[in-house]
Amino acid sequence: MKKPTVLAKLLLLTLMAVPIQDLAGTKDFSHGISPSAIPPVANPCPRLPPGSLVRNPPALFSHGRVLKVNFSYQTATDEDGRTLYCFMTPDGLENPTLHVRPGDDLIVNVTNNTPSAPVEMQIDPPNCGATAITGSSVNIHYHGTNTSPSCHQDEVIHTVINSGESFRYRIHFPSDEPPGLYWYHPHIHMHVEPALQGGASGAIIVDGIENLQPIVAGLAQRIMIIRDQILAGSPPEGNDVPSWDLTLNNIPIAYPEETPAVIQMKDGQRQLWRVSNSSADSILDLQVLYDGNPQKLQIIARDGVPVGSQDGSRHGKIISAKHVLIPTAGRAEFIVTGPQAGVRDARLVTLGVNTGPDGDNDPPRTLATIQAVSTETTAMSEPDSFVPPALGSAWKQRFERVASVRPTRVRRLFFSENNPLSQFFITQEGDTPTLFDPNGSPSIVTSQGSVEDWTIENRTLENHEFHIHQLHFLVLAQNNFEVNGSVPDRTIQGQFLDTVQLPFWDGNPGHPFPSVTVRLDFRGPDIGDFVFHCHIAEHEDNGMMALIRVEPSS
């Protein structure tokens, strides 16, 4: 929806930006595991100047089937008065990329070193940490991973880590986890948007994609994290003014100058670009242009799943496209061929996205200029700069052959909203729209072993993004997109995603609602309560989320 004025936002952020407290009185909610408190790091959440060279984020790798990470969750204020958030390691790495393999354990010790804040909501038992949400609470969602929603794993409803408290996660990645790009970020109800716009997110890579997509073996790879943030100053109103600034690997592309970052590539070099739209609210439609001509992008994975890899062959396919739409929280991995020396103007852009009359402004922008160089550059000297050249064996995939399974249940859901009151809802057909309550009852109850087809309608005048935790879904159909001039995205049809965009309804009572139909496979080991929601963070924070309960199979 349309946002409050920039002046109001900056006033709020100024009130929030207070000095970091010390660790006196640190509490430990580790349920007997007893992690040590992680001390704060000096000068947290650093940012690069506009026009900087794009480098991969720092990377950490598992050893002996385990990756252990210590995080200090911290905040800072930038030169424009915006509040920043980040996960810092004791040696000063900001939001590092976490590399694991199927079957690994990821152990994350996190201490919340942000200032304390007043209590906003009590969380009913069973609690996994603190019993109340405050304005500085944090937890971590391991987005897209097919991991357990139990306490100390990927549980976001009752896991609350407040100021001065420490917590230990132990995430077990299943042996059939698809290889690809995932990500982590805070998921405290009512506070996802400021955490994401503050920059608290990082990539997770389940290694081994070369075993399902041999074409990428040995390629140089770039990990690109695109985030959004509040515009500085008091920009004018207008359709050409973005609702939010963008950043690329912490390089600002700020309105009105919108100075692009710089990507250097060897002449004609093929690279694997692994792009996460880690924005709170901004939708991306990426394109690579050489002298104004769109270049062929070879898509090899979406949302962490190699395309075409779940048909039982355990061998991915390639999808060619001239642009890649990535909704908020989505990821795309694709091969780009660098410009030859004769190309005068090479750039990575995001095309304009019409999000509807009640939506944000997402105008076209240049994210980076691409420079052809004759030799390897320092930008490709990071530890994870290349995909391993040696191929291993492909493993059984999590969602093999679910396309041929008869569903055990069919459901219809819909997005709706009370826009003047900033209230947002996701509702199962037949139920009354209700704002999300973490202490409420599940909206949907299913059982382990079921396979369900859901059709989700958008009954609003702005775009929404459907996301569900703990599993991916198969995209079966994109319905009635043409009512507002949109077209279905052919690159995701028949693929597995964890986030999918629904375009806005045009408001004509005689026109059908845009919708998607997806298949969800609950035959895995994960049981318990988790959530589904719109991943435009403002909508999620303001109620557009619901609980699902998966009961054990009888």
Image: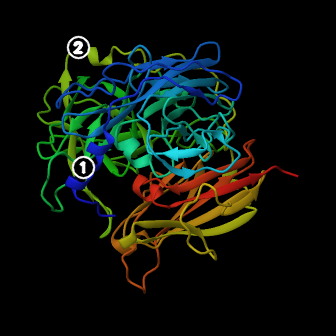
Q: Picture quarter containing residue 489?
A: bottom left
* Rendered view: 94 above or below 502: above
Considering the numbered disc 1 on the image, is that residue within a helix, a strand or a loop? Answer: helix
Q: Which residue is situated farthest in the front direction here?
A: 25
* Mark 1 Cα-neighbour bin, 10 Å: few <14, some 14–19, many ≥20: few
Residue 118, horizontal then vertical, whole percent: 46, 45
**Three-letter amino acid code at the position of disc 2:** Thr
Nearer mark to the viewer, of 1 and 2: 1
Residue 144, horizontal then vertical, whole percent: 55, 41
The total of numbered circles placed on residues is 2
**Three-letter amino acid code at the position of disc 1:** Leu
Judge left or right: residue 376 versus residue 176. Answer: left
Q: Nearer the viewer, residue 444 or 457?
A: 444
Residue 298, horizontal then vertical, whole percent: 40, 39
For label 1, the residue is: 11
Q: Which residue is situated farthest in the right direction here?
A: 554
Q: Picture quarter containing residue 294?
A: top left
Which quadrant does the N terminus fall into?
bottom left
Whether tag 1 and tag 2 are in contact, CB under 8 A, the answer is no
Judge left or right: residue 266 versus residue 121. Answer: left
Taking the spot 53% from the left edge, 46% from the top edge, the residue there is 133
Taking the spot 37% from the left edge, 24% from the top edge, the residue there is 57
Taking the spot 16% from the left edge, 30% from the top edge, the residue there is 51
* Rendered view: 309 above or below 40: below
Q: Nearer the viewer, residue 490 or 140?
A: 140
Judge left or right: residue 307 versus residue 382. Answer: right
Taking the spot 20% from the left edge, 26% from the top edge, the residue there is 52
For label 2, the residue is: 375
Q: Picture quarter containing residue 293?
A: top left
Q: Nearer the viewer, residue 415 or 331?
A: 415
Considering the numbered disc 2 on the image, is that residue within a helix, a strand or a loop? Answer: loop
